[in-house]
């Protein structure tokens, strides 16, 4: 459980300026500790919702190439809506990270007080490593986007039917035909997925990153409920159980998929030429 910082003086704000009342309400909210924690909690829960649905969507890979490629194609066909969702996600990441690091710095600046409290009640490992696991997740997202979304050549290249190098993003589903336009093609996201996880090093990196994500989620989801004022004694056990359930679901699902490729349970229909 997290240590509680008891401040003898009124809670300091994230800003040092004394003319706060002249500022708009949203600036004052972001600069106050309580307001910043509230926004960190809201954006954190929004990102958690994304990772839950992302994992559940990806589980379709167990249904085979057509099911998985149809799902990826449907997402891409959302067009402008997809860009709105991407923009929202990016905004959540930037706000969540920016405010969380600001809060962390403020907490470190109040260090003498923190020591007094921590001597009596030691914070758990996930709680103490929130900044580190958060930055590790950011690094994972950058790697993951380079791997699958942007097809960064050194980690996203395989060979085509003639044995020529081909980027993951250029793979075409060999079995799909558009009923209206015979020239149309669709991306072979399934093959990209399978080839991406045939590399044991990459699978190892993903697994470690999911464990770090799990550490972040187990404490983050619990604290988010607290910051939103939901953790009354009546609800606390239920919310702790919910945080644990979400963490196990996301981490378990995200680890099972790459390991299943490596073990050969997924992707037997994808053969290298
Ligand atoms: C083992 C676990 C995961 C797998 C197998 C996986 C798989 C994928 C795949 C295949 C894509 C590309 C989809 C496409 O091009 O149509 C993708 C995109 C993405 N993934 Fe993951 N993912 C995993 C975990 C995560 C996690 C934990 C996060 C966030 C912390 C994440 C965030 C994203 C984002 C932001 C995109 C870009 C979505 C877009 O194109 O707008 N993924 N993922």
Image (cartoon, helix red, strand yellow):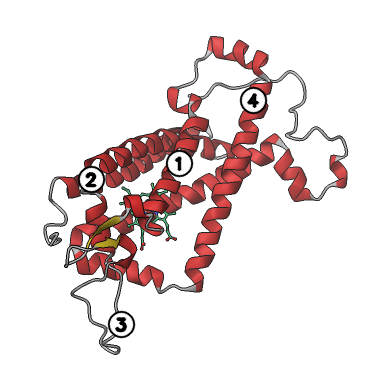
Name the secondary structure under disc 2.
Answer: loop
- Whether ligand 1 has any atom under 8 Å from the Cβ at mark 4 is answered as no
Give neighbour class at mark 4: few <14, some 14-19, many 20+ (Cα, 10 Å).
Answer: some
User: Whole-Å distance between the Cαs marked 2 and 3?
Assistant: 31 Å
Residue at left offset 77%, top offset 35%: 15
The image shows residue 85, relative to residue 238, as above or below, that is: below
Q: Is 45 left, or right, of 74 in this rendering?
A: right
Percent x, y of residue 111: 65, 17
Please tell me the numbered disc located at residue 139.
Answer: 1
Residue drawn at (11%, 57%), measured in percent from left and top? Answer: 268
Q: Is residue 228 visible?
A: no
- Along the line of sight, which residue is nearer the eye, 117 or 159? 159
- Of labels 4 and 1, the one closer to you: 1
Residue 91 vertical placement versus 237 (above, below): below
Which one is in front, 138 or 272? 272
The CA distance from mark 4 to mark 3 is 56 Å
Image quarter of the C terminus: bottom left
Task: For marks 1 and 3, give the CA distance.
Answer: 36 Å
Label 4, on which residue? 107
Q: Quadrant of residue 245 in the image?
A: top left
Q: Nearer the viewer, mark 2 or mark 1?
A: 2
**Dot 3, how many residues are within 10 Å of its Cα: few (below 14), some (14-19), or many (20+)?**
few
């Amino acid at each position: 459980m997290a240590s509680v910082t008891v401040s003898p003086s009124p809670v300091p704000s994230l800003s040092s300026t004394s003319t706060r009342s002249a500022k708009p309400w949203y600036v004052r909210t972001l600069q106050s500790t309580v307001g910043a924690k509230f926004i960190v909690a809201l954006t954190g829960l929004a990102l958690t919702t994304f990772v839950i649905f992302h994992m559940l969507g990806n589980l379709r890979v167990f249904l085979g190439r057509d099911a998985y490629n149809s799902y990826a194609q449907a997402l891409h066909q959302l067009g402008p809506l997809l860009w709105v969702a991407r923009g929202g996600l990016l905004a959540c990441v930037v706000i969540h990270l920016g405010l969380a690091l600001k809060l962390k710095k403020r907490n470190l600046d109040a260090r003498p007080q923190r020591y007094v409290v921590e001597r009596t009640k030691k914070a758990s490992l996930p709680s103490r490593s929130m900044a580190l696991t958060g930055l590790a997740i950011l690094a994972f997202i950058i790697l993951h986007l380079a791997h699958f979304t942007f097809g960064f050549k050194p980690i996203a290249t395989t060979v085509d039917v003639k044995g020529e190098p081909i980027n993951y993003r250029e793979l075409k589903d060999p079995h799909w035909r558009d009923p209206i336009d015979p020239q149309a093609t669709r991306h072979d996201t399934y093959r990209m997925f399978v080839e991406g996880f045939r590399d044991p090093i990459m699978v190892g990196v993903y697994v470690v990153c999911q464990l770090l994500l799990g550490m972040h989620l187990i404490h983050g989801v619990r604290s988010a409920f607290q910051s939103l004022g939901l953790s009354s004694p009546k609800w606390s056990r239920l919310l702790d159980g919910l945080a644990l359930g979400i963490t196990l679901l996301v981490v378990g699902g995200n680890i099972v998929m790459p390991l299943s490729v490596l073990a050969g349970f997924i992707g037997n229909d994808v053969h290298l030429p």
